[in-house]
Image: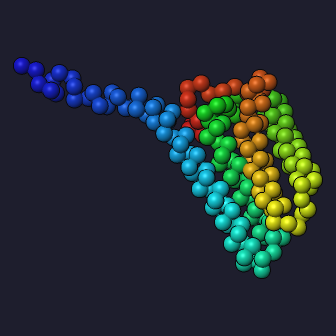
Amino acid sequence: MRTFFSAGLSDWPLRQLPALRRSFRRHVEPCLSLAASCHRCAAGLALWLIAVLLNGHSTTGQPYSYLCYGGFLTGVVIARPLELSKVNFDPRSSTILVKILRYLLSVGLLILTLFALETIFLLVTYRDSMFWNLLEYVRFIAAGFVTVFLAPWVFTKIGWAGTLTDGTSSFAA
C-alpha cells in the first residue's frame, strides 16, 4: 500500500517553488517597487522641507544640496526596477573601448538632460521661487532616470551592450 510519502507527493510543494518565485517576481515585485518609490520620493521631499525649516526658511545652501541629492536618488529608485524589467542591461558585456564610449555617452546624456531642463524651467519661473525648487527636484529625478534607465536602454539598442537573458541582475554575481 502506497502512502502519501512513498507516492512522491511529499516534495510536491518544493517542486512548485521556482514557478511561485517567477510569478512573484513578475506580478508582485513591480507593485512593491512602485509603492517603495512613492515612499522614497515623499521621504526625499520631507528631508528637503526639514532642511529648509532648519535653515531659517531659506532654500539656498544645504537645503538645495539635499534637494538635488534626494531628486537624483528618487530618479534612481524609480528607474532601477524599470531597467531590470525592460532592459536588464549587462554592464560586463563589450570591450574596454566600448565601455569607455558608454561612459562618455552616459555622462553626455546626463549633462544634456540637466542643461536642457534648466533652460526650459528658467522660461517658466525664476530661480528664487519655491516652484523653481520643485522643478529642480524634477530635474534631478530626470537626471537619475536618464542615468539608470535611458542610458542602458540606448546602449542595448545601438549594440554597445548586451542584456542578461537568464533573468538575473548584474549585481547578483
Residue 109 at what x, y percent from top left?
Answer: 84, 40
Q: Residue furthest left?
A: 1
Name the foreground residue: 115 vs 173: 115
Instruction: Count numbered badges in the picture.
Output: 0
Residue 119 visible in the shown view: yes
x%, y% of residue 100?
83, 35
Q: Is residue 38 above or below residue 79?
A: below
Q: Position of residue 40 (x, y in %)?
A: 62, 56
Which picture quadrant has residue 88? Answer: top right
Decide: is 159 above or below 47.
above
Is residue 95 visible to us here? no
Q: Quadrant of the N terminus?
A: top left
Residue depicted at 76% across the width and 62% down the height: 67
On the picture, is 94 further left or further right than 18?
right
Residue name at image x 55 percent, y 26 percent: 166
Q: Residue at x 53, y 42 (%)?
A: 31
Position in image of residue 107 (x %, y %): 84, 43
Q: Residue at x 84, y 61 (%)?
A: 132
Relative to 28, residue 53 above or below: below
Picture quadrant where residue 131 is located: bottom right
Where does the C terminus fall, quadrant-wise?
top right
Q: Nearer the viewer, residue 121 or 32?
A: 121
